Amino acid sequence: MKTRHIVLAVFLALAPIATLAQSAGVTESMLLNPPPDSWPTHHGDYSARRFSELKVINDTNVQYLSLDWESRVTGGIPADAPPGRGGLAGNVRVAGSPLLVNGMLYFTANDNAWAMDVRSGRIMWHWYRESTGNEPITSNKGMGMYGNWLYLITRDNYLVSIDATTGAQRWIVPVADPKQYYFSSMAPIIIKNHVIIGTGGDSLDLSGFLQARDPETGEIQWTHYNTPREGGPGIETWPNEYAAAHGGGGAWVQGAYDPELNLYYYGTANPNPVYAPQSRKGADLYTSSIIAINPDTGGMAWYYQASPHDTHDWDAACDTVLIDGTINGKARKLLAQASRNGFFFVLDRTNGKKIVAVPFVDTENWSKGLDARGEPIPDPAKEPSLGGSLAWPNAGSATNWPPPSFSPQTGLFYVGTGEGYAIFYLTDTDEHPEGYAGIESALGEGPGSIKALDYRTGKIVWRHDWPNGGSAVGLLSTAGNLVFCGNANNLVAFNARNGKILWHAGLLGSPNAPLTFMLDGRQHVLVFAGDTAYNFVLNTPALAATTRAAAKKPE
Amino acid sequence: MKSRKYAVLLSAAALAIAAIALRAQTPAPPQNQTEARPQIPASTAETPAPPAPNPPPTVGTNATIGATPAAVRQSGEDPAAVARGAEAYATAGCGSCHGATGKGTDIAPDLVRSPLVEDDTKGELIGAVLGQPHPKNGGTKPSLTDQQISDIATWLRVQVYGAAMRDTYQYLNIVVGDPQKGEALFNGSGKCNSCHSVTGDLAGIGSKYQPPQLQSLWISGGANARFGRGFGRGLLTGNGGMLADTSPPEITPSTITITVTLADGQKFTGVPVTYNDFYVAFRDMSGAYHSFDRRGGWPKVEVHNPLQPHWDLLKHLTDDEMHDVTAYLVTLK
């Protein structure tokens, strides 16, 4: 009896400490140097490489990767959902990347957020809010975490802060008006005490922006419009301020951050009206561009425009991957993007100067070389037209927001690509066209591949062409000489150096980008496919023996 | 200058009303509401001055692209009210400043991109503006009945819907090519006639499809022509998709087929159900289902895609050539 009391007393004394340690949540140092048992920001770290140093699971044993658990989530059901929707009500797709902090996974689907115990798949809490607006269907990419507070932006443009322990909503603040068809989907990125979010909208030619919010109150710290205003740099690339202020440049990917340079890198969305060129003659800065932003002020340090005067809805809304590499024998701070227009770009991330700009798809047909800044020159003949213009890539693009991966071990940039094409028609010939102002008639998905590019040249070192097509998919590379990605409903592991398939698992949906971490002495690979999380661990004969031996050890 | 001040007045009013509207539906956040709605900033923040007669606009009044019939249908608004609204908008002369389709001119703001119009649900906000002295009328109230105001509001909401929803857009006349050149290409370098005949499979195709559909069809080779894809059709029948289809597959000239060769030399021909790096599943010509693991390099799988020539053609087809062939096919009534 006494011993039990003592145990209880010790437990009680320790309990507050444990709670405190947990409530510390995500710290700045954790974001700068993520511990191997965590995934504290969208891409695991600020570089957006989606590369893990872990190599317990590697090219010699990945064939023993086995399911540890799976766990399915059901979304909230709108109050006015008609009865008899069968199994569809509550169907969700977890499209973005979960966070992993203190053994808890935090992830979202549109209108929903969850916490899940990563050791078992047990759902700890579920947050749900019905969307109110006119926004189009999008894929929420996930959450950001600061201390013990989670942040997500809803598709109808509200920034929500949630208590990570309880799932209770702390506050909700509006970011943009859903009645104007603004939509939001990016996972907030936490940099120091800034919650960085973005929004935009194509339907009514809005002005997309990035914004920093206070993590405690949600108050605006700065707003950066992705198109200029009168007197600002770049305004000369628009006919007038009105066109620029209705010129798009939405913000819906996550970006990357270099703490040394204190620059946040971002790929902006397309200009507006989306398919009509006549009311926005010029390059339309800073749409479809890679921009570098000071996260403390919102000021722009430099830009590189991936698609000057984009008329195909390509955006430059893809991940910007930070590479510390070597070019011509010199150590360089680089940024790489496989862009939706089919070009692979490598820039000097200190100044935005182009180092590489080459197509990474076989079919790109819209550019006429590079201009003096090293940006692709669009062929005006491929702008949407009355009779239709046949262009590669289509608006679904050569790749898209599912994240690519870069392995410093192999020096290869891995990306999922497709060769889809479309006929682009102009349907609004007025002086002031509006909205999309055209129709993209997408006709073929085309062949699809995983490609491994040499970051120094953009040359394809290996490629795997999927037998039945494919397109953009989320990737992960590891120091175990592995690349993980999805194809149809399969999670596939490749040898990172030569592209040989080493392992796969058939899931119930298309996998998003996996994550990996060490927990309880084992390396895990975790992936969401549709509404289900799958957690994989190694069951090699050797590891099984070690585990048995450990279990037999006396207390 | 004057016209800009008027634009400022209206947009300021719009901002104020919209801010109130937004606040009303917002879960009470402690912050500056106007920040929630990006506006053209700074230079427009002048003191409104009394309006003066406007010069006639030089752009925008001859706009022709507005909400399509599909937009009226899908918007859920009463089509009769939309029609009355269009008439009232025209009769009251709104279009002479705001443009024939409401998209604005160089002297008056765009009503389709107006936050006030977007926030309006049944004329309460638009009516409030039209019920006030309107600068265009020299500061007098527009002479519109309540019904007309309501109808104009309805028409405007449909214009917004029509601009925003791209599935309501209408193709313009896409037949811009030269049918004679198209015919020459069809029978010449395009080699279309090596598989197709204008008196056979393509007879009367110009009357079966609208030109945009026709162009998509011949470019892609048909609805199922997803190059390298198009698999997975025809495995399950109706009955809630619970029964496997075991009837012989229907083979059309565009059906993708595969030949599967086992390690022992045995060969199957069929229609693919799934084909990836790990296994192949197909129905043979009798309808029987087969699946094989193919990780050991066997069986060998050969895909026959009769639409491959379309894909190959596209790589060097110019847009002019595409338009010419479409113009020719349109004549095949």
Image (cartoon, coloured by chain):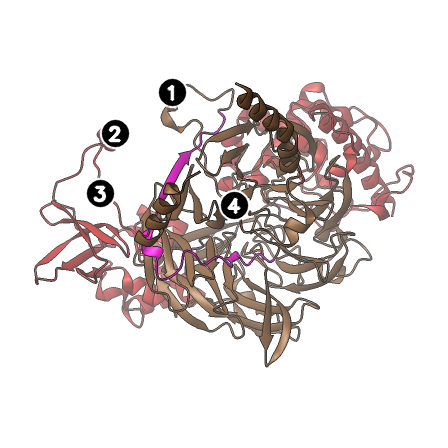
Q: CA distance from mark 1 to mark 2?
A: 15 Å
Circle 2: residue type: Gly
Q: Report helix, strand or loop for mark 3.
A: loop
Span colored in magenta: A47-76
Q: Nearer the viewer, residue B4 or A259?
A: A259
Q: Which residue is mark 1?
A: A84
Name which residue lies at 75% across and 34% down: A217
Q: CA distance from mark 3 to mark 1?
A: 27 Å
On screen, residue A186 above or below A356: above
Can you tell which mark lies on residue B240?
A: 2
Q: Which residue is mark 3?
A: B234
Q: Seen from this angle, which residue lies furthest bottom? A: A328
Q: Is residue A48 magenta?
A: yes
Whether callout 4 and callout 3 share a subunit is answered: no
Name which residue lies at 72% across and 48% down: A192
Q: Earlier in the sequence, mark 1 or mark 4?
A: 1
